[in-house]
Amino acid sequence: MPPESTENPYVEEPPTEFEPVESLDETEAREQADLLREAIRYHDRRYYRKADPVISDRVYDALFARLETLEDRFDIDSADSPTQRVGGEPVDEFETVDHVAPMLSIDSTEDADEVRNFADRIEREFDGVSYVCEPKFDGISIEVVYEDGQLVRGVTRGDGREGDDVTANVRTIRSIPLQLSGDYPEFLAVRGEIYMPRDAFQAYNRELVERGEDPFANPRNATAGTIRQHDPTVVAERPLDCFFFEVLDASREWESRYAEDETLPEFGLRVNEHTTRVDDIEAAISYRDDILDQRDDLNYEIDGVVIKVDGRAEREALGSTARHYRWAIAYKFPARTEETTVRDIAVQVGRTGRLTPVALLDPVDVGGVTVARASLHNPDEIARLGVDIGDGVRIERAGDVIPQVAEVLDDGDGHFEFPDSCPVCESAIERDGPMAHCTGGIACDAQLRESLVYYGSDPGLDIDGLGERTIRQLLDTGLIERLPDLYRLDADELAGLEGWGERSARNLIEAIEATEEPPLADFLSALGVPHVGPATARELAREFGDLDSLMGASVDELESVDEVGDVVAGEIHDFFASEANRAVIEELRNEGVEPQSAEMSGGDELAGLTIVFTGSLDEYTRSEAQELVEAHGGSATGSVSGNTDYLVTGENPGATKVEDAEAEDVERLDEDEFEALLADRGIDPT
């Protein structure tokens, strides 16, 4: 029974219904907040360091939410409160600070005889040497400093003498206590290894793959990329963990490294359960072989073991070189090569909706490159290989570049079943031969970036200032998460982004607002409906007149439109039949976007004429020229056929259209001749 349980009601079977905050005075609020902090620290220790929780996640969340409410309402937050782990303000750069004590590197070898030579040198100077053996974690070394039991600094290893102050990021890692427990020393600087657990790494990579983003190559890269994030809230969202294994400096002394390992858990500092002490170097070598056998069953990456002299007195006498300790050696494992295990299979959703299955692997060396994923190409390839989660496989790099599963080594039963719905948006999956595509379109988050870029491009609504770089920044900062969020952007928030000012922010807002009443054809093209470019969008707008009529059209009605065949008609129908897509369109309308009906504003002066444009015109964009023709009753198509009356050519015309016009005996007009045609028909384009 924990010592807190007799006085703290939130430790064992805690209540989750609380009296209204309004009924508390500040003294009562402070008392309750102190009890909640104490209890949450206890539950964190049980969950993150002992893997033995005593309450459910739901109860924990209720206690945490109550503490947040009290701290916010009464302004009583504290630096060591568990609520401070959610992150802080971003920083522009990390400050470089000196280490309390040098964090040197360790000599390494894969040769057992070199390990024996290491021991011989030591044992010539000292009798009865014991060694501490521990896994060599493949993560990021960190110095964590406590004063009066409170975490005051976290510093990366850097060059061993100084490193980056990443305290704000370290504070978000729940296995690193903000406040020590037990009989801790007044000052304590301890070395640890931050890492990403293997199961968490695979889950995180799966999310990246499904969103169409590049996954991390291995857990170490994921850890390094996370701990150096300038925004602590990003770090707080990623699954980092930590083991501690060395006291760098303290206001208390220990006689041996193993004695440290026995004491650190009393302070709430997590140590590794596989650390042990042995009496001779042969036992240390056997330890390495035993850990190698267990390697695949551990939930963290290791690349060997570290063998250290246990006694403090012997360590101090041995000292160090300028770069490494003389009292430790790393006995490394051989690299995994070519053969590995499939830990998961994720289905990646590309920017165009194409689905690609990806095998997430235990990292393996293939031709000198660490590989943690491999393409499975398509559902038919999965069936051909017979590959499933948990299978042993052989990996090769196709063309010495792209990793792929070449062979399944385990002859298991069956294979991975390809999903029927998109893993990102749950829309139906459409099969086209061996290929598979998500039908989610604008409602699929994995396709969002490409959808946004296209929406603001020239074939879409031509929003000035909304290029790919801007879209990436808006997504990365969380200002937009869905297409309709474009119309919810705030000029002040935009102006606060890097590279923005009040004028540029206002210009973009005004450019977006100017698209709230787009021509129906432009809006249809901007949505990125499969196979619907500007020319087809104009035909659809002419045929159906308004958006609601088009959204309710049957496949047969769609197929009757010029340039729309049966396959395209089915794609258009499915796009507008999707509840998710319709919801996005409804959101856009709620934000004031109302496509304008395709009405012939200038009459029917060009009725019966079909005109194609190619090349660059001086007075019009191609889209403007096409809209002008259609506004006066003509048809502006994207390709030349026997029904075409005129091909209008500007600078650098397309060779194919010119050749087709010659073959079909279609009359060619330059821009001046096109304007003369308009004038002859009584059309004033101004």
Image: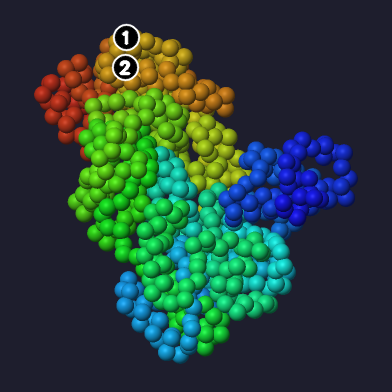
Residue 380 in sight:
yes
- Where is residue 158? Give x, y as percent: 49, 71
Q: Position of residue 253 (x, y in %)?
A: 64, 79
- Residue 138 vs residue 297, the one in the foreground: 297
- Residue under label 1: 556
As displayed, is residue 88 above or below residue 135?
above
Q: Residue at x 27, y 52 (%)?
A: 339
Query: Which one is in front, 623 or 325?
Result: 325
Give residue 387's mark: none
Label 1's element? Answer: helix
Element under disc 2: helix
Which residue corresponds to the image point at 54% horizontal and 56% vertical from the top-left?
241
Observer-nearest residue: 345 or 168?
Answer: 345
- Outermost residue toward the bottom? 125
Q: For residue 632, say whether it is visible.
A: no
Q: Residue at x 59, y 54 (%)?
A: 50
The reply to whether discs 2 and 1 touch (Cβ–Cβ < 8 Å) is yes
- What residue is drawn where x is 31% and y is 43%? 391
**Quarter of the rendering occupied by the C terminus:** top left
Nearer to the camera, 546 or 479: 479
The amino acid sitting under disc 1 is Asp
| Amino acid type, label 2 | Ala
**Where does label 2 land, which residue?**
569
The mark that comes first in sequence, 2 or 1, is: 1
